[in-house]
Image (cartoon, rainbow, N blue to C red):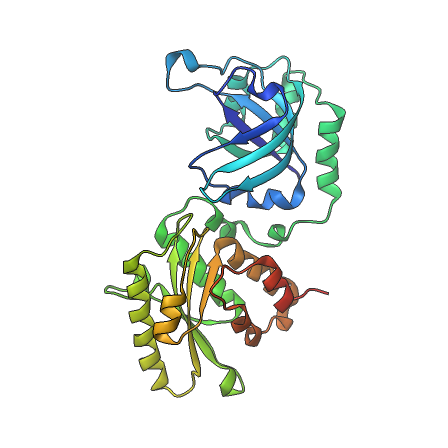
């Protein structure tokens, strides 16, 4: 079943009636990242009430639109590039939103629900709009469709504790032995440590990680200092066990903003990972598809002072 992207605004009473780019400052596109793999997609431009009394545009009809591009720029401003198709006659924006039952600036709704509402109001969607729904139904499933709804929650708004728990479960699913700390243990600890013990001891390693349930994470001084202490403490404890050859460190966040981990690497002689929430899910997808061919001996090759790219993951975990 295809998703329809709903975009809402009260900027201007003719906003949805022509092609343009719709920006949404201070909002995150994490919850709809999966749509990037399906572009172009069917969308609906809806008018809503504003804070000011004279900004109530919700009585205006919505529009059929096509979403051509979804981008998020450095300052954390999501932008949707769309084309106008036609005004949806016979239903007000407020009525459509009431029927859908959502109240966000942008969100997805299953096509079945949208088509059902249109039938109720006698709306016949234009052919080019309906064609997009049919194409997405028959196209190759996106990689996120392999992953359960529970894990996909880390792309949306969840509590810090839940974020930590799901990240730990993803590491476990990848095949690591996970020692979860963070909110589960009183005191000053990293959110967790993952360990891989290889048959050949020289390939064994551990990763000290900290979760940052935020966008545009920039690594403040306190977090930098804390990670150095975590690494040194873990190295001391694991070396006593004589089976861990190397200790890495990792930050996991929704996105990053000009982050520099070189100081941590230099002072601890440890190499780092900068993983995004989507990276973690993409690695889980690779594990699901590759099964036993997903080798943790390749995982340390992802380490870098830069945010890990999809291309780097594909290079180390190719799917034939």
Q: Which residue occupies the foreground of this view, 265 or 125?
A: 265
Up-down relation of residue 311 to residue 4 (above or below): below
Quarter holding the N terminus? top right
Residue at left offset 39%, top offset 88% = 242
Residue at left offset 58%, top offset 54% = 147
Up-down relation of residue 296 to residue 24 (above or below): below
Residue 98: % across, % down: 50, 22
Residue 72, can we see it? yes
Residue at left offset 62%, top offset 60% = 311
Residue at left offset 64%, top offset 46% = 37
Which quadrant of the view contains residue 183?
bottom left
Residue 44: % across, % down: 60, 26
Q: Which residue occupies the foreground of this view, 139 or 266?
A: 266
State how many labels appear: 0
Q: Which residue occupies the foreground of this view, 151 or 207?
A: 207
Q: Does 5 sit left or right of 217 as displayed?
A: right
Quarter holding the C terminus? bottom right
Residue 180: % across, % down: 37, 66
Residue 179, can we see it? no
Residue furthest left as drawn: 187
């Amino acid at each position: 079943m295809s998703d329809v992207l709903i975009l809402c605004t009260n900027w201007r009473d003719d906003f949805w009636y022509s092609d343009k780019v719709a920006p949404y400052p201070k909002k995150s596109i994490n919850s709809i990242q999966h749509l990037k793999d399906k572009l172009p997609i069917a969308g609906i431009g809806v008018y809503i009430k504003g804070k000011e009394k004279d900004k109530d545009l919700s009585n205006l009809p919505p529009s059929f639109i096509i979403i051509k591009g979804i981008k998020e720029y450095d300052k954390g401003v999501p932008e949707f590039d769309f084309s106008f198709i036609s005004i949806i006659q016979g239903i007000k924006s407020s009525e459509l939103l009431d029927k859908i039952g959502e109240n966000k600036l942008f969100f997805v709704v299953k096509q079945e629900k949208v088509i059902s509402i249109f039938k109720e109001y006698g709306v016949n969607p234009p052919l080019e709009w309906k064609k997009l729904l049919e194409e997405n139904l028959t196209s190759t499933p996106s990689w996120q469709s392999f992953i359960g709804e529970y894990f996909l929650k880390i792309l949306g708004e969840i509590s810090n504790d839940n974020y930590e728990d799901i990240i730990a479960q993803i590491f476990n699913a990848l095949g690591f032995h996970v020692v979860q700390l963070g909110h589960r243990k009183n005191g000053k600890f990293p959110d967790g440590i993952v360990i891989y013990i290889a048959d050949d001891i020289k390939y064994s390693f551990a990763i000290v990680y900290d979760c940052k349930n935020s966008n545009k994470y920039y690594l403040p001084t306190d977090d930098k200092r804390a990670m150095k202490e975590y690494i040194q403490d873990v190295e001391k404890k694991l070396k006593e066990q004589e089976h861990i050859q190397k200790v890495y460190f990792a930050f996991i966040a929704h996105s990053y903003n000009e982050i520099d981990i070189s100081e941590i690497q230099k002072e601890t002689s440890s190499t780092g990972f900068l993983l995004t929430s989507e990276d973690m899910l993409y690695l889980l997808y690779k594990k699901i598809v590759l099964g036993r061919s997903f080798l943790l001996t390749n995982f340390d090759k992802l380490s870098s002072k830069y945010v890990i790219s999809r291309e780097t993951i594909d290079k180390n975990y190719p799917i034939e």
